[in-house]
Amino acid sequence: MRTQEGRLPDLKVMAQRVREVSSQFSLRGVEATVNGQLVKEQGQLQLRLSAGGEALRLIPLRRKVQWNPQTKQAYPATRQELTAYRSLAAHWQGKPFRVQVTGPLEVSETGAPLRLEVRAFRPNP
């Protein structure tokens, strides 16, 4: 799914719309691939979006969204996926740079920025 003008989707509304289709359905998660500037604010790595100026707090991958229908479980993360956040943090040299980050997008509590779990990244998209 591509969003209008590069804006992030409202995850709560998206989950509600899925439930409206049928009570048998639910939204397990949303994985996003997002382009922006890697910045560090208040000691936290963030991705400032190219469009709209929104910021996503970056965090290590906790679980994959991809589902294995045969085992009825999420696919296990690879070692590379589990260490992607640490690898991205190692690229930080004190100056913002362009990067593309892929991973599960999640709503944070208390109006804080959305969080993006880093599953993969690519500098200079």
Image (cartoon, rainbow, N blue to C red):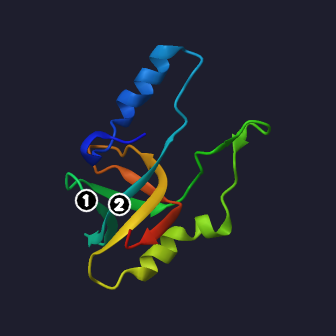
Q: Position of residue 72 (x, y in %)?
A: 74, 36
Q: Is residue 81 left or right of residue 44?
A: right
Q: For the residue marked with disc 2, what is the amino acid?
A: Asn
Q: Does 16 appear above or below 106?
A: above
Q: Residues at badges 1 and 2 in contact (C-beta under 8 Å)?
A: yes
Which image quadrant: the C terminus? bottom left
Label 2 sits on a secondary structure element that is: strand
The residue at 27%/76% (across/down) is: 96
* Residue at numbered disc 1: 50
Most extreme residue toward the right, as rendered? 70
Q: Does 18 appear above or below 43?
A: above
Q: Is residue 79 left or right of residue 107?
A: right
- What is the crowding at mark 2: few (fewer than 14 residues within 10 Å), some, or many (at least 20)? many
Q: Is residue 117 left or right of residue 42?
A: right
Dividing the picture into quadrants, the one containing residue 42 is bottom left
Between disc 1 and disc 2, whose residue precedes? 2
